[in-house]
Image (spheres, rainbow, N blue to C red):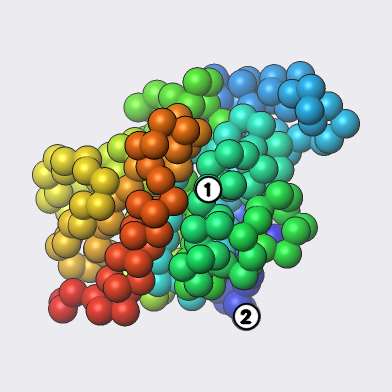
Amino acid sequence: MAVAHPSDPEATAWQALEAEIVACRACPRLVAWREQVAREKRRAYRDEVYWGRPVPGFGDPAARLAIVGLAPAAHGANRTGRLFTGDSSGRTLIPALYRAGFANQPTSAHREDGLELCDAFLTAVVRCAPPKNRPTREELRTCLPFLRRELALLPNLTVVLALGQIAMEGLRIMWREEGHPIPRLAFRHGAVYTLPPPLPTLLVSYHPSRQNTQTGRLTDAMLDAIFRQARHLIESPAPP
């Protein structure tokens, strides 16, 4: 299971949601791409069986922090079946979570590697690997109900960290569709937005993609600072 489940009835709700996510075939373009990648594979992983399906969230069901990325990487989560696992983004993000005390180990290689998150939950606005990492707006909107339902199952949620502009915009669209009058938000690394109750505080970061880390746009020190800020926000939440 993607989530360390509590006792019933919460476990039943998580299990039902995960099953629904994994079985989804709503977006033909994404279905075709994720399955093509899983068939053709990358040379380095040619002996592995790819997951090739939508990827559910992963983490602590009592989390106060939710971390929202863009989508599974074609040869990362689309291969391993767990977000930020087996790709360059995960090799940056998971050590940062470990340094901040949100993970029990600094590596994320496969679904049975023993990784556990503490007070954090990893998820994404889109659950299938999109061609060129670019989902269409329609695909994004189709997938957002899964994110909405996951966040609703986190009773202690206090802060949501958006990794990248698409994740931030997806969250804004989702909350607006719920009836919250959220205006357009400026994407800026380190920005903190206090949203109307009962919404969580929104924290923004560059995505830990290879494009950002290899160019120095996002450094380990910058990511560590983001998680220090996240820790401060969940320990000292804004008054209702």
- Residue 23 locus on image (x, y percent): 65, 41
Q: Is residue 109 above or below residue 4?
A: above
Residue 206 makes an appearance in the image? yes
Q: What residue lies at 62% left-to-right and 39% top-to-bottom? A: 87
Q: What residue lies at 83% left-to-right and 27% top-to-bottom? A: 46
Q: Which of 61 and 10 is in front in this view?
A: 61
**Residue at numbered disc 1:** 92
Total numbered badges shown on the rendered structure: 2
- In which quadrant of the rendered image does the N terminus lie? bottom right
Horizontal side of residue 23 vs 113, given as left or right: left
Q: Specify the quadrant of the image occupied by residue 14.
A: bottom right
**Residue at numbered disc 2:** 7
Horizontal side of residue 76 vs 234, given as left or right: right
Q: Which of 130 and 115 is in front in this view?
A: 115
- Residue 79 locus on image (x, y percent): 71, 37
Q: Specify the quadrant of the image occupied by residue 88.
A: top right
- In which quadrant of the rendered image does the C terminus lie? bottom left
Q: What residue lies at 39% left-to-right and 54% top-to-bottom? A: 221
Q: Specify the quadrant of the image occupied by residue 4.
A: bottom right
Q: Is residue 205 above or below residue 6?
A: above
Tell me the kind of residue under disc 1: Thr
Q: In this view, does 163 lie above or below 231?
A: above
Dot 2: element? loop
1 vs 2, front mark: 1
Dot 1: element? helix
Q: Nearer the viewer, residue 43 or 8?
A: 43
The label number, if any, that marks residue 177 in the structure image: none
Tell me the kind of residue under disc 2: Ser
